[in-house]
Image (cartoon, rainbow, N blue to C red):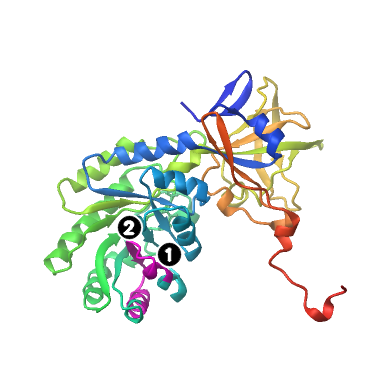
């Protein structure tokens, strides 16, 4: 059952009416279903029952510390890509032994933060980075565990902006170069090369690229072991897609079966980094219709949420289902647009949707991943609150920003001050 259902003609998240939240918190807001998150996490994790594994939720999909604390309590680790995300994961009480740190451009400060936090491993993406991790660990009298991010050169068959596993991408080390880098890393005094990592892209709706990548990595692990490099962790990254519209997203079972085909009885711990797959369908953005507008060409609903709140439609031309919070039979063909002065500021374009009148509410569905985390203050719009619903209750896990929040970190030079 979906986390979002109509009850008495009103859209609810679990047992809480979205209209009630809107009345009490105002619009727009993001809302996440705690049970939706738990269900997805458990399903993903259980698909690998009987195998040593760590599921590290990708914080960049939805980094709210309330959401992270909930997933952490389910046993989730964290896949992080910045010092800020490490701060979030630790603040949320997530287990440091289940934190993996990815990213092509880690700074010295971020590396030191990771070492002092004693995280599970860095997923290193270049020899220069390996050298820097070794130097930092040396200065700190520590040993840093690393995996090398290998680029298996497989086509993820997804949107080019979110495809990361091809030779032409900036990510990882080519698979045929990885062996010498492993041998090199193992020779360094403050590095322990414990893992191998890949992440080939996001929103994958085909299984075969995952299987192909896993097979390439397993082969490399065997080769490395023969050369005295003992790999303990095989990190297969994230990327498993979800259904937004009419795409067929593989089930957790299908995904696990494909991985098991190439893994069988190897003695290492599997690591996964799902982001979108855990939280995408568990969230919605609720927004109010401010005005309706008809031109000779087109009809518009102008709503109070915009591209700064949800970037995916303008950035990737992404499709998000739109539902009326008060159910209606009447339909409308046109665009749902925000107040920002850009023609790319749309949430839904050229669509046939429920017709919500001025003052009514729309829910933009499946926005629990890469929604709030990609939000900005463009046009000096305060960022919207995030609400976590759990059964009958809702919790404000991030309050609405105020105007003072916008200018808080800024300052006027003394000579320009008027008071
Ligand atoms: C973005 C990212 C993920 C998560 O991707 P999803 O498609 O949301 O599962 C996992 N690992 C790395 C290294 C990433 O960059």
Look at the image and say whether residue 131 sits in the magenta stretch. yes
Relative to residue 91, is residue 109 depicted above or below? below
Residue 363 on image: x %, y %: 63, 34
- Identify the residue at the far right of this view: 418
Q: Which residues are magenta?
A: 113-136
Inspect this view and state whether residue 240 appears: no
Residue at the (70%, 31%) spot, across then down:
333
Residue 351 on image: x %, y %: 65, 34
Inspect this view and state whether residue 260 appears: yes
Look at the image and say whether residue 53 sits in the magenta stretch. no
Relative to residue 82, is residue 181 depicted above or below? below
In depth, the one of 279 and 240 nearer the eye is 279
The mark nearer the N terminus, 2 or 1, is: 2
Task: Write down the residue under mark 1.
Answer: 103
For marks 2 and 1, give the CA distance: 19 Å
Mark 2, mark 1: which one is toward the viewer? 2
Task: Write down the residue under mark 2.
Answer: 97
Tell me if the residue at label 1 has its CB under 8 Å from ligand 1. yes
């Amino acid at each position: 059952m979906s986390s979002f259902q109509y009850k008495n003609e009103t859209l609810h998240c679990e047992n809480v009416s979205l209209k009630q939240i809107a009345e009490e918190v105002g619009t727009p807001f993001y809302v996440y279903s705690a049970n939706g998150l738990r269900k997805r996490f458990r399903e993903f994790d259980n698909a690998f029952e009987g195998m040593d594994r760590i599921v590290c939720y990708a914080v960049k999909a939805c980094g709210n510390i309330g959401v992270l604390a909930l997933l952490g309590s389910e046993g989730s680790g964290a896949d992080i890509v910045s010092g800020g995300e490490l701060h979030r994961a630790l603040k949320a009480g997530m287990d440091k032994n289940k934190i993996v740190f990815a990213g092509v451009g880690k700074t010295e400060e971020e590396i030191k933060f990771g070492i002092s936090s004693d995280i599970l491993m860095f997923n290193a993406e270049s020899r220069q980075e390996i050298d820097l991790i070794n130097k930092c660990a040396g200065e700190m009298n520590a040993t840093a565990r690393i995996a090398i991010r290998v680029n298996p050169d497989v086509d993820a068959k997804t949107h080019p902006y979110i495809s990361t596993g091809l030779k032409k991408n900036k990510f990882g080390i080519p698979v045929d170069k990885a062996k010498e880098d492993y041998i090199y890393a193992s020779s360094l005094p403050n590095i322990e090369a414990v893992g191998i990592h890949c992440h080939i892209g996001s929103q994958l709706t085909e299984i075969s690229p995952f299987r192909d990548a896993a097979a390439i990595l397993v082969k490399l692990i065997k080769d490395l072991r023969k050369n005295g490099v003992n790999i303990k962790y095989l990190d297969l990254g994230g990327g498993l897609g979800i259904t937004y519209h009419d795409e067929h997203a593989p089930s957790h079972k299908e995904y696990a079966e494909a991985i098991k085909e190439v893994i069988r009885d190897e003695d290492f711990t599997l690591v996964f980094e799902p982001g979108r797959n855990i939280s995408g369908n568990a969230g919605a953005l609720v927004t109010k219709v401010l005005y309706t507008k008809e031109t000779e060409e087109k009809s518009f609903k102008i709503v109070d949420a915009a591209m700064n709140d949800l970037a995916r439609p303008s950035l990737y031309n992404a499709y998000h289902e739109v539902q009326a919070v008060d159910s209606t039979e009447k339909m409308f063909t046109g665009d749902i647009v925000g107040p920002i002065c850009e023609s790319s500021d749309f949430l839904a374009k050229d669509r046939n949707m429920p017709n919500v009148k001025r003052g009514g509410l729309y829910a933009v569905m499946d926005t629990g991943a890469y929604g709030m985390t990609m939000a900005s203050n463009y046009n000096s719009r305060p960022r919207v609150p995030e609400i976590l619903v759990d059964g009958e209750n809702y919790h404000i896990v991030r309050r609405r920003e105020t105007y003072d929040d916008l200018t808080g970190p800024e300052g006027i030079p003394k000579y320009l001050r008027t008071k």
